[in-house]
Image (spheres, helix red, strand yellow):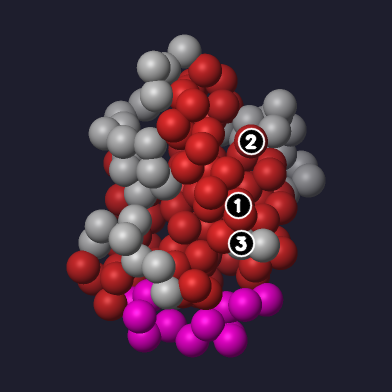
């Protein structure tokens, strides 16, 4: 797990996902949530968990205008130009996907369990979840 911080965009997968969103827009967000919630997936791999949290962070930024966690200038520009009304229907599915990432059938919480920053990571995910309320 190559991470440099506890935020959703502070890992290689989250940072790479930013480029996908700039290229594919809302489709990339919806796809990340769909993968996380796929009923045929018994166990959510850490990479998919990172993608889901990054997608949720991006959606939350579009909906509430808070871009402090968006580290890519290109993505920040996309977020500022995105139509919150068009993306608002993704809010519920994003919240469900974040719950899946935190659940017992997800690799990401296990990877963070032995990390000194585990509480900070969990706090950032809970803050993200609250932003999607």
In the foreground, 110 or 129: 129
- Quadrant where the image shows the N terminus: top left
Taken as a whole, is the magenta stretch helix, strand or loop?
Answer: helix
Q: Secondary structure at mark 3?
A: loop
- Residue 31 is at least partly visible in this image: no
Q: Nearer the viewer, mark 2 or mark 3?
A: 3
69 inside magenta stretch: no
Q: Is mark 2 in CB contact (under 8 Å) with mark 1?
A: yes
For disc 3, the marked residue is: 132
Specify the segment rendered in magenta: 78-89
Tell me the CA gap for discs 2 and 3.
15 Å
For disc 1, the marked residue is: 129
- Mark 2 crowd level (few <14, some 14–19, many ≥20, 10 Å Cα): some
N-terminal of the two: label 2 or label 1? 2
* Residue 32 % position (x, y): 55, 56
Q: Is 4 situated above or below 19? A: above
**Residue 102 image label:** 2
Query: Residue at horizontal 38%, vertical 75%?
Result: 79
């Amino acid at each position: 797990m190559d991470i440099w911080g506890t935020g959703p965009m502070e890992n290689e997968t989250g940072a790479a996902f930013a480029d996908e969103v700039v290229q594919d827009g809302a489709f990339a967000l919806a796809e990340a949530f769909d993968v996380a919630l796929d009923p045929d997936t018994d166990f959510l791999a850490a990479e998919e968990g990172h993608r889901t949290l990054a997608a949720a962070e991006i959606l939350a930024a579009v909906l509430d205008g808070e871009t402090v966690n968006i580290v890519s200038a290109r993505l920040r520009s996309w977020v500022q130009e995105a139509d919150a009304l068009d993306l608002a229907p993704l809010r519920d599915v994003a919240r469900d996907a974040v719950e899946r990432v935190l659940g017992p059938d997800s690799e990401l919480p296990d990877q963070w369990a032995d990390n000194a920053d585990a509480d900070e990571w969990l706090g950032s995910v809970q803050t993200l979840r609250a932003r999607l309320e």
